[in-house]
Amino acid sequence: MEEKVQAILEILENRYPESMCALHYGKDYELMIAVRLSAQCTDARVNLVTPALFAAYPTLEAMAAAPIEDVENYVRSCGFYKHKARDIVLACQMLISDYGGKVPGTMEELLRLPGVGRKTANLLLGDIYKVPGSVVCDTHCIRICGKLGLSHGKDPEKVERQLRKILPPEKSNDFCHRLVLFGREICTARSPKCGECPLSPFCQEANPAAKQ
């Protein structure tokens, strides 16, 4: 498994030398907001919505004081806008009241924030604090790692634990970002380009021998 993981990492690193979050943000709390908006929504849509939102409420204090109904109007096109707007405002309020105006740097603290689950927390830990072993189990990660035989099942927390055991901690965050790029370019959910896939030798769907 170790050789297989190393080979997959090298292929993805060569194909996507720049591994970074696809969401646009300037401040740490803006990444928290953008990730919340990205739930069941595309990053491209979120990147269209956030500039106006961040311009209307340019500071953490302004966002925390924003009327939830007004935030709803800005984020409506992201879906589930009522829940998302509420979580955004309440999370910003908690950053001020409990964390000194900063996005906290531990899993336990992050999970206390409204709308923040393990996926969001891992992304914040990896991107903001560069915490080794941060594994962002989004739909791309779960789907593609399953095909590659790196994990099994679809429960995000279980897949996260499986990947933590086999991924080099210092590369896990970048690996997850690269999987998103790979999932959009090659291994799409509806019509994967198997004939162009550099990971096909490891894919259990494209190459049955990979299961052995």
Image (cartoon, rainbow, N blue to C red):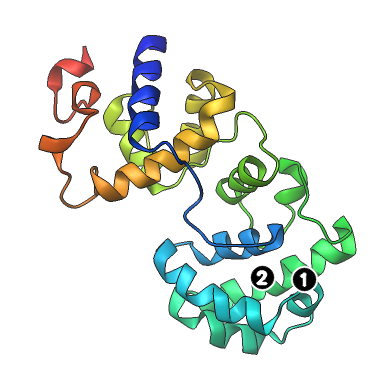
Image quarter of residue 115: bottom right
Q: Position of residue 157 (x, y in %)?
A: 52, 38
The residue at the point 50 percent across, 36 percent down is: 174
- At numbered mark 1, what does the secondary structure look like: helix, strand or loop? helix
- Residue 196 is left or right of residue 72, and the answer is left
Q: Along the polypeptide, which appears first: circle 2 or circle 1?
A: 1
- Is the N terminus in the top left, top right, bottom left or bottom right quadrant? top left
Q: Is residue 182 left or right of residue 51?
A: left
| Total numbered badges shown on the rendered structure | 2
Q: Residue at x 38, y 27 (%)?
A: 151
Give the residue number, with chain letter if any, for mark 2: 88
Q: Is residue 41 visible?
A: no
Q: Amino acid at mark 2?
A: Ile
Task: Tell me if residue 78 can be seen.
Answer: yes
Q: Secondary structure at mark 2?
A: helix
Amino acid at dot 1: Leu
Q: Is residue 160 above or below residue 82?
A: above
* CA neighbours of label 1 inside 10 A, class few (<14), some (14 to 19), many (20+): many
Report the residue marked by disc 1: 60
Between marks 2 and 1, how big is the CA–CA gap? 11 Å
Q: Nearer the viewer, residue 93 or 80?
A: 93
Give the residue displayed 70% in from the left and 57% down from the top.
Answer: 28
Residue 194 placement: quadrant:
top left
Quadrant containing the C terminus in the rendered view:
top left
Residue 43 position within the rendered picture, expressed as x and y whole percent measured from the top left: 43, 62
